[in-house]
């Protein structure tokens, strides 16, 4: 039977120490509920002595969240431990987590205490906490910079005093994986009563080694790992829960351990924490980054299409996402291009596909990512050419306070000039209604947006309009320093695409190029 690793989540305590990540009690409760659904074993809900709000949050979580053990942090001081105990009182399963620095630099400059004093205070803190709960965790802060011999003495003493978990923090991210693994191995081998306590680790990411250090510790005997969602936390953050859990799952052949995490809840939990803390997950973040399951390289796309495991060691569905995405860009290959066109409903002959692929490559050199609308336009251009049915020649807007917005629009159609006017709820609405009168159609406006393409007061505005008519949906774009003109251009562009698409799709169906 595999050894089971306890997942101790400290997103709500150490994670909240990330600058700008302050959470309200209701937000903490929402995350705690999701952490329970994720299946973490222990939720460190906060540091009650730090503020009334934190104490309130811990108490609400203790009252509401069932399943995981609820933990609260306390310094090795009576007031801290009392506050933690009070906040945890409603919890069915509770843990008081006490800590005291043990490294030479902390003893000398922060605590101004000798080894003997540290040893006495650590034992006292554990003994005092045991008055409130049997489940007490002790952390020798800055353990990775503490003399191994003294660290072992402290651990032996606190276990004798009743600590059920001893946590080895790499508080400043100083450790190296080989060194940290050996430290854990030494503790397991040399502390006489270590079998009476779980061995935990808590690693920071100052050198980018929090996850490797945690994994090295597990490989050398640690039975609990402390981590946070998205790796958030003090300074450069903590060990990332999702990276540790998925590594242990994917490389079970190497580590030989398992966790109780429901991995399909990972993506949802990551999004919730990101949303409530306001800390955006970087696109290339392992497991939960936006690009983690997206492929743009043509070689990779070709491999994925032939057999997913060629370039993916896990499925996106395993963490609760949809299928992997093939991102079409300048590095994409012909195979992925053809596959995407087929998914959009187009099946081209080899000659048509070759021409369309060359056009796609030219466009991809100009744009970072090519979208489905771009592909549809390329295909339409490479099939019997469509001409521009309508062209915007002139636009005049009358609008202002107390004035009904009116638009006069002049279009050309196959050499003929058409002109009409209409009023509307606003200048853009008036333009659209005037254009509809001229063309004799009233398509449904699905979406409309205007964005700034360039900077400055003379910025170019780009309007994007999506229209739907008789089951066909198209997008049109237009650009101008006048956003009303950009909107009118986008609307006419969409109308032309609508007419062109209706004609071409009928023709393509007859030629069996487009799926019926």
Image (tube, helix red, strand yellow):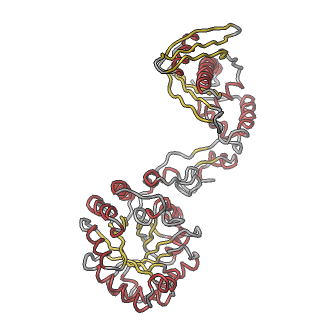
* Quadrant in which residue 2 is drawn: bottom left
**Residue 275 screen position, x and y as percent:** 45, 50
Residue found at the far bottom of this picture? 116
Instruction: Classify the position of the C terminus by image quarter.
Output: top right
Residue 333 on image: x %, y %: 70, 42
In depth, the one of 274 and 250 nearer the eye is 274
Give how far across and how far down residue 104 sits, in percent: 51, 86
Residue depicted at x 62% and y 31%: 462
At a point 24% along the width and 68% down the height, the residue shown is 89
Relative to 501, 58 lies left or right: left
Res 68 → quadrant: bottom left
- Residue occupying the point 51% across, 78% down: 220
Residue 467 occupies quadrant = top right
The image shows residue 127 at horizontal and vertical percentages of 30, 83
Q: Residue furthest front?
A: 401
**Residue nearer the viewer, 319 or 434:** 434
The answer to whether residue 291 is seen in the rendering is: yes
Quadrant in which the N terminus appears: bottom left
Note whether residue 505 is visible: no
Q: Is residue 278 above or below residue 514?
A: below
- In this rendering, the answer to whether 33 lies above or below 133 is above
**Residue in the foreground of this view, choosing between 123 and 424:** 424
């Amino acid at each position: 039977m595999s050894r089971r690793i306890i997942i101790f989540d400290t997103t709500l305590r150490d994670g909240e120490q990330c600058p700008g990540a302050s959470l309200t009690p209701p937000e903490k409760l929402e995350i705690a509920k999701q952490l329970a659904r994720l299946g973490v074993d222990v939720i460190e809900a906060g540091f009650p002595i730090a503020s009334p709000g934190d104490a309130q949050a811990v108490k609400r979580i203790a009252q509401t969240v069932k399943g995981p053990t609820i933990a609260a942090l306390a310094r090795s001081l009576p007031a801290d431990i009392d506050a933690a105990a009070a906040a945890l009182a409603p919890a069915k399963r509770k843990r008081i987590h006490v800590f005291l620095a043990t490294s030479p630099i902390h003893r000398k400059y922060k605590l101004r205490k000798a080894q003997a004093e540290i040893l006495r205070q650590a034992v006292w803190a554990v003994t005092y906490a045991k008055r409130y709960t049997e489940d007490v965790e002790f952390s020798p802060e800055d353990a990775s910079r503490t003399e191994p011999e003294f660290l072992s003495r402290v651990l032996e003493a606190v276990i004798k005093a009743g600590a059920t978990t001893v946590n080895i923090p790499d508080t400043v991210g100083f450790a190296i994986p080989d060194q940290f693994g050996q430290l854990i191995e030494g503790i397991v081998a040399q502390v006489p009563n270590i079998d009476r306590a779980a061995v935990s680790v808590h690693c920071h990411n100052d050198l980018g080694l929090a996850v490797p250090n945690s994994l090295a510790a597990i490989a050398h005997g640690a039975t609990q790992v402390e981590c946070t969602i998205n790796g958030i936390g003090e300074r450069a953050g903590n060990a990332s829960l999702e990276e540790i859990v998925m590594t242990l799952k994917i490389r079970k052949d190497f580590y030989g351990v398992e966790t109780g995490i429901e991995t399909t809840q990972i993506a949802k939990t990551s999004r919730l924490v990101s949303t409530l803390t306001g800390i955006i997950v970087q696109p290339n973040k392992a497991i939960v980054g936006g690009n983690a399951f997206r492929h743009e390289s043509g070689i990779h796309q070709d491999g994925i299409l032939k057999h997913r495991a060629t370039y993916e060691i896990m499925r996106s569905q395993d963490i609760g996402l949809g299928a992997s995405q093939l991102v079409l860009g300048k590095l994409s290959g012909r195979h992925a291009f053809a596959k995407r066109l087929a998914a959009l409903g187009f099946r081209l002959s080899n000659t048509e596909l070759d021409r369309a692929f060359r056009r796609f490559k030219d466009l991809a050199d100009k744009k970072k990512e090519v979208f489905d609308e771009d592909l549809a336009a390329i295909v339409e251009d490479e099939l019997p050419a469509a001409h521009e049915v309508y062209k915007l020649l002139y636009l005049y807007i009358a609008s202002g306070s107390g004035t009904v917005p009116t638009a006069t629009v002049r279009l050309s159609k196959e050499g003929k000039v058409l002109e009409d006017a209409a009023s509307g709820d606003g200048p853009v609405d008036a333009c659209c209604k005037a254009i509809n009168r001229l063309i004799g159609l009233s398509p449904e406006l699905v979406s409309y947006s205007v964005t700034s393409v360039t900077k400055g007061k003379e910025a170019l505005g780009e309007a994007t309009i999506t229209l739907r008519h008789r089951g066909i949906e198209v997008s049109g774009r237009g650009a101008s320093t006048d956003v009303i003109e950009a909107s009118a251009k986008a609307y006419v562009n969409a109308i032309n695409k609508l007419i062109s698409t209706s004609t071409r799709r009928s023709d393509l169906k007859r030629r069996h190029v487009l799926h019926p």
